[in-house]
Every structure is written in structure tokens, then in C-alpha cells.
């Protein structure tokens, strides 16, 4: 499921050791994503748009290695597969943390997502199951077209999971866009890697 990264052979060893000691080792960016084609494709395939862009996000995460790095006991591990813990809204307007298993097959992933959303609706509170370490943290704010984003964080809690959030879909002259926020641990990657990932993700949304 995971393998330890050889720090001595890693060209980012010094960067990792420098940033992991910081009280706030995360940095983040907010961009605008073109989702015109992705929205139409989701409708064509008969899956919810939320499920579709969540699937594309996880596909990019699983294909881009730095997003599969996690810090465990001061060591860096590379996971074979990354799943997602997404906030799921209930009818009473509270939310719970889910855990949705990734699949390379969209239909299978859509079924996993549907079952987990239904399960959350039958629970109360935030933490509704045991959670694994091979996750990204994901949220959608379809009410807000945000231009920046921050997260509530405990600096004493060991955390290295990327955090990805999407905002309200905007439609201007037939072009649909969404704001996308991405926060990552600087000990595991730099701005170059974030730029590569976001370009890769946008390309997937065009397919």
C-alpha cells in the first residue's frame, strides 16, 4: 500500500527538513478552472457534476507522485493509491467527513461516491468512521465564488494531506468556471509541483 521514500537519495531532503519543522508548513493558491467541457461531459455521462470533478481531481492526484507523499513519524511515504475525505452536507445543514475510495473507472467511483453520501446522511457529527492516511481533504462551497481561501488547522496535529476546495460555478457567455483552492505541505512539494499538478488537472477537465 505504501513504501518509504529514501530521504538520503531525495534531492528535496533539505527542503523537507526545513519546512517540516514550521508551525505552519502549508502554502496555498487559488485559481480559476475552466469547467465548460467537464460540465457538459458529466451531463452526457449521466453523473453529477460534483462526482465528475471529484473524480478528475483524484485522477490527477493519483497520477502525480508528489501528491501521494505523506509524512508519518517524520518519514516520507509514497502511497500506491489516494482516496478522498470530502465534506458531505446533510439535510439539517451540518456536514460529516466521508471517505470515498478512488477507482480508475468513473462508473465504479460514482457508485462509491453515491453510497458514501447516502451513508453520511444517516449519521450525525463530524467523524463517522475510521479514516486512513492515504487521503486528500476535499470540500465544495457551491454558494461562494471565492478568490482566496484558508483552512482551520491545529498546528499540533500532524498533517500532510493536500486540501482541495471548489467554489460556485459561474457561467459567462456560455463559459463555465469555478474557483479552486489548493493547499499543500511545503516539505513535500514546491510551487513548481503545484503548477504542474494544476496544469495536469485542467487538461483532464478538457478531456
Image (cartoon, rainbow, N blue to C red):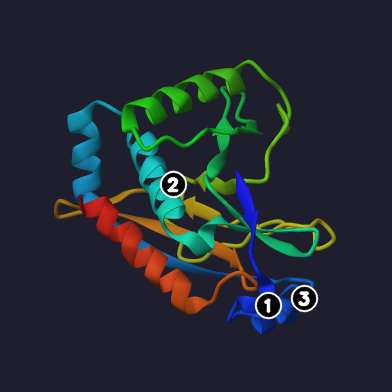
Work out whether residue 171 can be spotted.
Answer: no
Residue 194 makes an appearance in the image: yes
The residue carrying mark 2 is: 58
Q: In the rendered view, does 115 fall on the left or right side of 69? A: left
Q: Farthest residue in the top direction?
A: 122
In the image, farthest residue toward the left? 173
26 vs 154, left or right, is left
User: Within 10 Å of the Cα at label 2, are there few (<14), some (14-19), or many (20+) other Cα atoms?
Assistant: many
Quick one: 146 or 107, which is closer to the camera?
107
Marker disc for residue 8 = 1
Residue matched to label 3? 22
Q: Is residue 103 left or right of residue 67?
A: left
Q: Of circles 3 and 1, which is in front?
A: 1
- Inter-mark Cα distance, 3 to 1: 21 Å
Mark 2–mark 3 Cα distance, whole angstroms, equals 28 Å
- First in sequence: mark 3 vs mark 1: 1
Amino acid at each position: 500500500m505504501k513504501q518509504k521514500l529514501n530521504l538520503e537519495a531525495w534531492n528535496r531532503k533539505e527542503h523537507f527538513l526545513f519546512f517540516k519543522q514550521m508551525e505552519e508548513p502549508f502554502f496555498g493558491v487559488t485559481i480559476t478552472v475552466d469547467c465548460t467541457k467537464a460540465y457538459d461531459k458529466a451531463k452526457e455521462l449521466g453523473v453529477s457534476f460534483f462526482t465528475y470533478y471529484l473524480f478528475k481531481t483524484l485522477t490527477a492526484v493519483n497520477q502525480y507522485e508528489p501528491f501521494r507523499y505523506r509524512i508519518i513519524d517524520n518519514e516520507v511515504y509514497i502511497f500506491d493509491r489516494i482516496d478522498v475525505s470530502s465534506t458531505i452536507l446533510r439535510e439539517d445543514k451540518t456536514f460529516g467527513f466521508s471517505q470515498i475510495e478512488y477507482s480508475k473507472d468513473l462508473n465504479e467511483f460514482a457508485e462509491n461516491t453515491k453510497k458514501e453520501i447516502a451513508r453520511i446522511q444517516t449519521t450525525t457529527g463530524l467523524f463517522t468512521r475510521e479514516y486512513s492516511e492515504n487521503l486528500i481533504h476535499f470540500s465544495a462551497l457551491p454558494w461562494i465564488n471565492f478568490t482566496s481561501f484558508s483552512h482551520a488547522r491545529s498546528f499540533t496535529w500532524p498533517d500532510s494531506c493536500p486540501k482541495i476546495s471548489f467554489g460556485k460555478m459561474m457561467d459567462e457567455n456560455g463559459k463555465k468556471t469555478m474557483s479552486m483552492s489548493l493547499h499543500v505541505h511545503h516539505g513535500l512539494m514546491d510551487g513548481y509541483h503545484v503548477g504542474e499538478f494544476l496544469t495536469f488537472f485542467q487538461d483532464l477537465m478538457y478531456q
